[in-house]
Image (tube, rainbow, N blue to C red):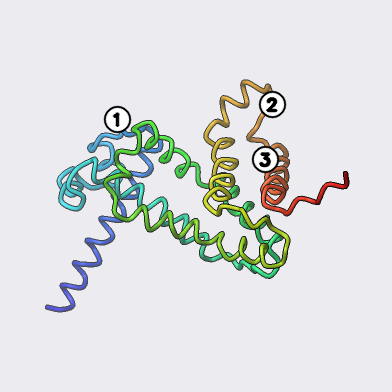
Amino acid sequence: MGKNTGVRAQQAEETRARILQAAITVFTRDGYSGGRIEKISAQAESNDRMIYYYFGSKEKLFVKVLEHTYERFNQAESTLQLDPSTPEQTLRQLVAFVWDYYVTHPEFVAILSIENLHKGKHARQSSELRRLSGEAVGVLRPIIEAGQQQGLFRQDVDIKHVYLMIASLCYFYNSNLHTLTSFLGQDMGAQGQRQDWLVFIQDLVVRGVRVLPESTI
C-alpha cells in the first residue's frame, strides 16, 4: 500500500513537472494569449484535464511559471562561490553570472517580458515572488558591505539600486536583441559583441559603487 502510494506520488510529481516545463516552452514561444491550454497539454504529452487538476487554470499555471523561472535563477545563483573579501572582483563575478544567465536562458527574458506586457498582474497573485526577489537582492548585501568596510565602495549606496542597475544592463540588451541588431546594423547576438558589452557593464557597475577620488582643485 505504502509502496504504491509512493509510486503514484512520484508519477504525479513527474506529470506536474512535465506540464510546467511544457508551459514554459509554449508561453515563451507563443506569449500568454497564444499559450492555449491545448497547446501546453500537447507539448507535455498529457491532457487538458490534468492541467486543470494540478494548476486550476491557465492564469494560475502562468503564476507557477513565473515562480519557477525565478526559483531556477536563484538556485543557479546560490551555487556561486562569492568571496566578499574581494568585493570588486566578486561584484564583477556576479555581473557576469547574471549576464550569462540571461544569455543562456532566453525563456527567462521572454517570461519577464510577457508579464510586463500584462502589467505584472500574475506576479501580484504570487506570495512567493517577494521572497524570491528578496533572495536575489540579498546576494549583493555582503559584497557591498564588505566594499564599504574596506573603504572601496561609497557609504550611500542603495543595494536595491545596484540590483536594478545590474538587472537592467543585462535585461535590456537581451530583451531587445533583435531590434537592436536592426537599429545599430550589427549582430548584437555575436559572441564578440556580447563579450564587449559584458566587460563594459562590469566596469560600469564597479564604477557606480566605487568611492570617488577627492577633487584635487
Indicate which disc, 2 or 3, sits on the residue closer to the N terminus: 2
Residue 97 located left or right of residue 45: right
Check disc 2 and give the amino acid type.
Answer: Gln
User: Is residue 52 placed above or below 12 in the rendered structure?
Assistant: above
For label 1, the residue is 33
Query: What kind of element bears circle 3?
Result: helix
Q: Residue 174 at x, y = what percent?
A: 56, 37
Q: Give residue 57's quadrant in the image.
A: top left
Amino acid at circle 3: Arg
| Residue receiving disc 2 | 186
The quarter of the image holding the C terminus is top right
Q: In the rendered view, does 197 fall on the left or right side of 50?
A: right
The image position of residue 26, as x and y in percent, is 35, 38
The percent coordinates of residue 117 (x first, y second) are 38, 31
- Pointers 1 and 3 in contact (C-beta within 8 Å): no
Which three-letter amino acid code belongs to the residue tagged 1?
Ser
